[in-house]
Structures are given as C-alpha cells and as structure tokens.
Amino acid sequence: MDASRSTNIAKKMIIRLLLLLLSIDIALVLIHSFDYAFICMKPSIYIALIVMHGVLLFGLGLFSKMPKPLYFMVSMIIACVFFSGTWLLYVGLSITSDWTYEVIESPRQTEALVIKKRVASGKSLYIYQFYKKVNGAGLLIKHLEKQDFNLNVNPLSGESGELNQPHWLNESTIEFDTVEGKKAIRLN
C-alpha cells in the first residue's frame, strides 16, 4: 500500500512540475509577444529557458521507468543541473552583452524611462532603445514603439554619441540634446 501511495505522490509532483514549467513558458511567450520584458532578463534568454524546460521534461520522461529511489535521485540531479545551467546561462549572457541600462525618473517620480544603450562599430554607432517601467519594482518594462534611434558619430571629430542631460517637458515626455539635434521620447 505504501508503494502505490508514494507512486501517486510522485505522479502528483511530476504533474505539478509540468504545469509549473508550462505556465512559465506560456507567460514568457506572452510577455515577449506583447513587447514587454523583464529588466533582469534579456529577451534571448526566454528561448533558452523554454529549450531547457524541454530538456528537463525529456529527462524526467526518460528516467520515469527507473526504480523509485533511483528515480528520485536522478530527478534531483537533473533539477540541480537545470537550475545551475539557467543561472550560468544568465550570467554568461549578462557578461558578454554590450547593452547597458540607465533609469531616469520623471520630476514628480510618477514615470520612469529605461534607456538601453549599446556602442557598435568601434565607437561610431550608438544604438538606443527606450522602455517604460510598468510596475513599481521596475522588473517589468514595456518597449516604447517607434522611439528607438541610432546616432552615427565620426570618431575622429571628437564628438560623442552619448545622450546629454535629459530635460523633462512634462511627466510623459523627455527631451535629449544629441549630436544630431534634439530627440523627444514620449512615454505614452
């Protein structure tokens, strides 16, 4: 009787794990498809997480025919490898990524602009993407459509492609002085 009870508990745990992984995958796909992102996760990591979930599920299915004590040990090892692999992938992508983030609060602190910047082509091309903070913690951000721009700078001219001091026109519009003139970003 104990063997069948432990089998039922193991099946329930596997079903819960499957539902958890499936809900995480669906949430990541929906967040990405509606142009939202997590500030702590690069969009390229979403695909890697979904692939790792598939590998984990394949491993669980492969080892489900094993005797229960061995199955539990192998499941724990797979889970540890999965979570440490996810962490190492995130750290690796963070280290190798050239993108930097800057957060600028509005004067009344009701809005916040997240600037994602990268320098390409040996300091001659500056790429800017803009996001709006969605929640108070700042983990969820929304990409501002048609607000991104690139600045091409001649490195020999001594000019910089950096955005100069921001000037808030109102709580939802910010303006920057650039080498190509003034650029206004609207948060609405």
Image: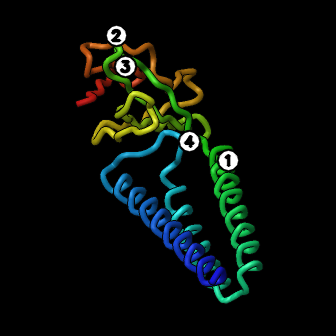
Identify the residue position indicated by label 3 in the image: 176
> Can you give x and y, in whole percent of width and height, for residue 121 in the image?
57, 43
Image quarter where the C terminus lies is: top left
Identify the residue position indicated by label 4 in the image: 120
Label 2 element class: loop
Q: How far separated are the C-alphas under marks 4 and 1?
A: 22 Å
> Can you give x and y, in whole percent of width and height, for residue 116 in the image?
47, 35
Q: Earlier in the sequence, mark 1 or mark 3?
A: 1
Q: How far separated are the C-alphas under marks 3 and 4?
A: 20 Å
Identify the residue position indicated by label 2 in the image: 107
Identify the residue position indicated by label 1 in the image: 91
Q: Nearer the viewer, mark 3 or mark 4?
A: 3
Q: How far separated are the C-alphas under marks 2 and 4?
A: 32 Å
Label 1 element class: helix
Q: Earlier in the sequence, mark 1 or mark 2?
A: 1
> Can you give x and y, in whole percent of width and height, for residue 65 in the image?
66, 89
Q: Earlier in the sequence, mark 3 or mark 4?
A: 4
Residue at image coords 62%, 84%: 1
The relative height of residue 99 versus residue 183 in the rendered view (above or below) is below
Q: Earlier in the sequence, mark 4 or mark 1?
A: 1
Mark 1 residue type:
Val
The outermost residue toward the bottom is: 65
Residue at image coords 42%, 56%: 28
**Category of crowding for the residue at label 1, using alpha-carbon neighbours closer than 10 angstroms: few (below 14), some (14–19), many (at least 20):** few
